[in-house]
Image: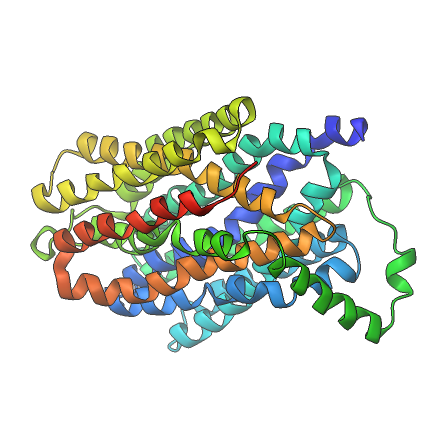
Amino acid sequence: MLNIKTKGWSWIPSIYYAEGLPYAIVIIVSTIMYKNLGLTNTEIALYTSWLYLPWVLKPFWSPFVDILKTNRFWIVSMQILIGSCLAGIALTIPSSNYLQYTLALMWLLAFSSATHDIAVDGFYMMALPPKSQALFIGIRNTFYRLAILTGQGLIVILAGFFQSWTDDIFKAWSIMFMFLSFLFLIFGLYHFWRLPHLESHSIKNNLNIYKIFQDYFKIFKSFFNKPNALAAISFMILYRLGEAQLSKIAPLFMLDSIDKGGLGLSNIELGFINGTIGLILLTLGGILGGFLISKHGLKHWIFWMALAMKFPDFVYVYMASAQPESFLLISSLVAIEQFGYGFGFTAYLVYTMLYSEGEHKTAHYAICTGFMALGMMLPGMVSGILQNILGYQSFFIWIIITTIPGILIIKLLKIK
């Protein structure tokens, strides 16, 4: 086990970057891409929020990942499939029916990514003892968020540069997705070589269909029979109620023109804000959160982390009201919000890991992330409609109001 812990540095950063990147592409990059390609805010919020569904439903197939094959097998095979989906998107963007084709491939990409998440998180918990898991939580969260910021930052910037180079936004995004497909083929090959072999096939290969389904329902039943299950599930759904809506509309707000109530930023400016200052502050927030939890425990910090995550949402109320033109000011305000998000999200991750502890931790953690995704999908679906009705400033005030349940629900949790 010590050897695996020591070698964790050779696979934990890369595997969590590979976990976060397809999620960022499906949920964040697709939003900006469809905005560039001419869809309305209401259409974008609705279509891209539906793409959360594989993450919501993944608990229903997560026990099969836990029972059949090994986590290592699923990780490598899903990374290859993700690369293939990205290549398909690249080839269909220039077509006349790009919306139908790309959405279908995004769905397959989302399904592959959700399966990949199950295997990665299970592999992490099986490869490391609990104390090492706490040590690496800040690192894995940082590289996961680095992947998210790559979607928000570098990918958007490169798409902007490709647009300037080709003078064709469709071709620019096609080139970008082809590059991403090659990246994931490299990930698959690297992790096939580098991931340690942890599990034995001997027991799994002897399972019959009846035994598989028996174990399947046993795993689900054991999750809902955990102590304080109702409060835990409510927390997973409500903790990011405000941020679920904000994450869909914030980039559209910054891209929209001044006369439409936005900030009028370009793809390159938006990508630079999210991918530089935002990245640095979010990373620091995640690392600080992991360090403080490891020192004093989650129970001591979770309430203050929740406040730190939600209070900075006020910066969007200010920006919608003042519509500042200063690039430095906008960058600074986004950085404050990102630091708070990174700090508060660490508490969320640690709680779900603690709640998943037990015999079927891989499947139970997948069920947790399914509820987390549901908490992002449903608010995100209606966010475009609400923004269209309320306008940007009133919508961001609404966001502040909807952060309150995520703070109040903490009082019902039982944290050792």
Q: Residue furthest top?
A: 295
Q: Please state, as top left, top right, bottom left or bottom right, where the C terminus lies in the image.
A: top right
Q: Is residue 287 above or below residue 334?
A: above
Query: Residue 383 placed where, x, y %?
Result: 27, 62
Question: Can residue 255 be seen in this snapshot?
Answer: no
**Between residues 365 and 48, which one lies in front from this camera angle?**
365
- In x, y percent, where is residue 13? 60, 35
Report the residue at 40% width, 58% height from top. Answer: 376
Along the line of sight, the residue nearer the viewer: 256 or 400: 400
Q: Position of residue 68 (x, y in %)?
A: 78, 62
* Res. 94 in view: yes
- Please state, as top left, top right, bottom left or bottom right, where the N terminus lies in the image: top right
Q: How is the image coloured?
A: rainbow
Total residue callouts: 0
Residue 58 location (% of width, % of height):
58, 64
Please indicate whether residue 254 sits to the left or right of residue 75 in the image.
Answer: left
* Residue drawn at (59%, 43%) of the image: 353
In terms of depth relative to the viewer, which is nearer, 142 or 226? 226
Query: Which residue shows up at 41% across the image and 42% down it?
Result: 154
From the viewer's perspective, is residue 237 above or below residue 267? Answer: below
Instruction: Kindly indicate the quadrant of the structure image that contains residue 167.
Output: bottom left
Q: Residue at x 67, y 56 (%)?
A: 363
Examine the image and state in which quarter residue 102 appears.
bottom left
Task: Specify whether 339 is left or right of 174.
Answer: left
Q: Is residue 333 above or below residue 119?
A: above
